[in-house]
Image (cartoon, rainbow, N blue to C red):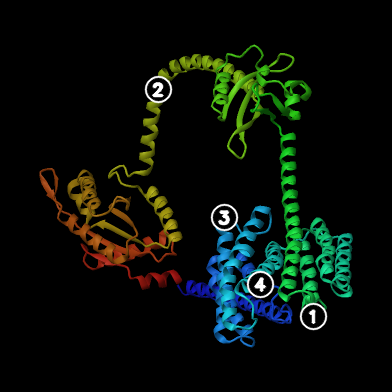
Amino acid sequence: MAEYSESAYRQQAKIVTHRFVLMVTVGFAYYISAWFGISQTIANEGIAILWPPNAILLSALLLSTPKLWPYILTAAFTAEIIAGLPSFPLWATISFGLINAFETLLAATLIRRGLNEPFDFTNLRRASRFLLFGPILAAAIAAVFGATVYLFLDRSGSTFPSLWRLWWFGDALGLLLLTPLLVRLGRESMNGFSGPGWSWPRLLEFAALWSTVFLLGTWVFVAVEHTLEVFHLTPAMMIPLGLWAAFRFGVLGAASTVLVISLLAVNYLVHGPHPYAESAPHFAVWQMQEYLTIVSMLSVGLAIFLHENRQQRNTLHLQYRAMQDSNDAIAIADASKEDMPLVWVNPKFESLFGYSAEEVIGRNCRFLQGDDKDQDAVKTIRAALQQRKACAVTVRNYRRDGRPLWIQLSLAPVHNRSGKVTHYVGIQHDLTEEKAQEEALRKTRHVLEQQNEILEAKVLERTHSLQTSNEALQAANKKLTTLASQDYLTGIANRRHFFETARRELKRQKGERGTVSLIIFDLDHFKEVNDRYGHEGGDEVLRSIIAPTKEMIRPMDLFGRIGGEEFLILLPGIDGQTATEIAERIRCKIRSLEIPCKDKTIRITASFGVSNWDGKSDLETLIFWGDTALYKAKQSGRDCVHNFPTATAQTKTAE
C-alpha cells in the first residue's frame, strides 16, 4: 500500500510539474509576443498592424488536449495583464485578456471539432478549417468586443467600423503568419523533428533564399522612395520569394520566410518612411495587412497544397506498385460503360491467363469462362453486378491455351464521391494446385478407408480371441499390484507400500512447508491372545480393529501395518495436538470392541505414541520419535496415548 501511495504521489507530482512548466512556457511566450506586438507593431498613430500573442495561444490549444486548456488560458490571461498594465488601465487590460481568450478558445473548439486525430497543417481541408474558424470567424467576432473597448478608451478618434477592421485584420494577420509555423514546429518536435531532408545543398539554397529576402526586403521597404502608387506595387516583388520557399522547403520553410517578410514590412511601416502624407494612416495599415495576408495565404497555402499533393502522389504510387507486384491477378473493369470492359490488368494477370494486356483491355472478362458459363459461381457474379454489390466465389476459368484454372475471385465495387459505382476491382487467386492436391488427397483417403475396413475386420477377429486372455491378464496384474501394496491379512498398506508413500508425502509437504503428524500403536498383551485363542483368534483381532480405526481418520490419511500387532498412521496437515485427540478416539474405539471367537468374547486394548514432524527430518526419525512415545505409553501402564514433545524432537534432529 505504501509503495502504491508513493507511486501515485510521484505520478501526481509529475503531472503537476508538467502543467506548471506548460503554464510558465505559454505565459512567457505570450508575454514576449504581447510586448513585441505593443512595442514593435504599433504605428505612430497608435494603429496595430498585427497581434502575435493570439497565435501563440491558439497554437498551444491546438497542440494540447482539451483538459489542459484551462491551465493554458489562465497562463495567457495572466501574461496579458502583466504586459498590458503599463499601456492600458486595469479594466481595459482585463477586457483585452478575456477577449483574446474567448477568440482563441472559440477558434480551437471549432477547428478541432469532429477531428479524431491531432490537428496539423497537412492538407488543404484542415488549412481551410483553420482559415474559416480562426482568422475569419473568431477574429471577426472578437473584433466587435475589442473595438468597443477602444471606443471607451477614446484614444484614436476613429470610428467603430475602422477600429473593428483594424482589430480583425491585426488578429487575423497574427494568426495567419504564426500559427502554421508554430503548429508545424510543435508537431515536428513531438515526432523527433526529422526535417525536410536538410542536405548541404539544400541548406545553402535556404541561406540564399533568406539572404535574398533580407536584401530585397531592405531595398523594397527602406531604400526606395515610395509614392502612394509605388507603395501599392513594390511589395509584390517579395511574393515570388514566398512561393520559392513553398516549392522547395514545405510548410515550415514557407511560414518562416513569410514571417521574415512580414517583420521587414512591419518595421518599415512603424519606423520607416511611408506615404502617410498622401493618405489616411488607417489606409496605409490596411494596405499592408492585405498585402501580408496575400503573401501568407499564397505561400503557406501553396506549401500545404504541394505537401498534400506529394502525399497523395506517394500513396497512389505505393498502391500502384502494390497492385503491380501482387502475387494475385488483379483486373479493373469500367462499370460506367454498358459491357463493363477491362481497363487495367497487372502482370500477374497476364502470366496467369496467358493473355497480354493489349489483348484483354476493352473486353468483358466473361471470355475467361470460355464455354463454361453456366456455373453457379458465374450466376452469383452476375447477380452481384446487377445489384452493384461485392461478392466472393470460386469459379472455373480457362487460360488462353484452354487449360482450366480454379480461381478464388473477390469482386468489389469502387464508388465515387457521390456514391455511384464507377469501376469493379477483381482479385483472382489461383487455386488450381490446391484443388489438385485436394482431389489427390480425396482419392488417397478413399483407398485408405477401404484398406482400413479390411484391417478392422481382421483385427476384430483377433481381438475377439485375445479379449478373454487380456481380461485375465489385467485381472492378474491388478491382483499382483494389490498384493504388492496391501497387507494380506488386514487389507491396509503393508510395510513397503507405507514407507514409499510416506516418504513421498514428506517430500511434498517439505516443498509446501506443510504439517505432518504420525500415530504409532500396537495391541497390549497380544501374545497372550495368540496363546489363549490361537493364531486364528489373533488374526480375527487384527482384522477387527481396522474398521473402527478407519472411522476415526480421513480417506487421505495413510494407514498401514508394519509388522505383527504394530500399526502406523500418517496424518498430513494435522498438528500434534489434533493427532493426539485422534489417537485418543481410536484408543477408546478399540477398548470398546467385543470380538467373538469360538463362543467367547475377546477384549483388547492398545497403546499409542504420537510424534509431530519438524519439517526437516526423514521418515525413520519421525517413526523413532513415535516409537519413543509408544514406549513411554507402555511404561505408563498401557491403554493410553503419549505425545513425543516437539522441543525434544527438534533437539534430537539438531543432534
Q: Is residue 259 above or below residue 428?
A: below
**Residue placed most toward the observer, 473 or 64:** 64
State which quadrant residue 142 falls in.
bottom right
Report the mark closest to the observer, 3 or 2: 3
In the image: residue 181, left or right of residue 531: right
256 left or right of 472 in image: right
Q: Read off the residue under disc 1.
A: 271
Q: Nearer the viewer, residue 486 or 378?
A: 378
Q: Amino acid at mark 3?
A: Asn
Residue highlighted by disc 3: 116
Q: CA distance from mark 1 to mark 2?
A: 116 Å
Type of amino acid under label 2: Gln
- The circle drawn on residue 467 is 2
Instruction: From the top left corner, tell me how far across and down residue 155 is, in percent.
Output: 63, 83
Q: Nearer the viewer, mark 2 or mark 4?
A: 4
Which amino acid type corresponds to the residue marked 4 in the rendered image?
Leu
Asked if residue 596 is positioned above or below residue 177 in the image, the reply reads above
User: First in sequence: mark 2 or mark 4?
Assistant: 4
> Mark 4 falls on what kind of element?
helix
Instruction: List the residue tagged with mark 4.
Output: 166
Earlier residue among tags 3 and 1: 3
Q: Which residue: 74% across, 63% down?
A: 296
Asked whether residue 195 appears in the rendered view, the answer is: yes
> Badge 1: how crowded within 10 Å, few (<14), some, or many (20+)?
some
Q: Residue at x 65, y 53 (%)?
A: 125
- Pointer 4 or 1: first along the chain: 4
Q: On screen, 540 above or below 289?
A: above
**Does residue 221 appear left or right of residue 577 in this picture?**
right
Q: What is the C-alpha distance between the residues marked 4 and 1?
A: 19 Å
Q: CA distance from mark 2 to mark 4?
A: 108 Å
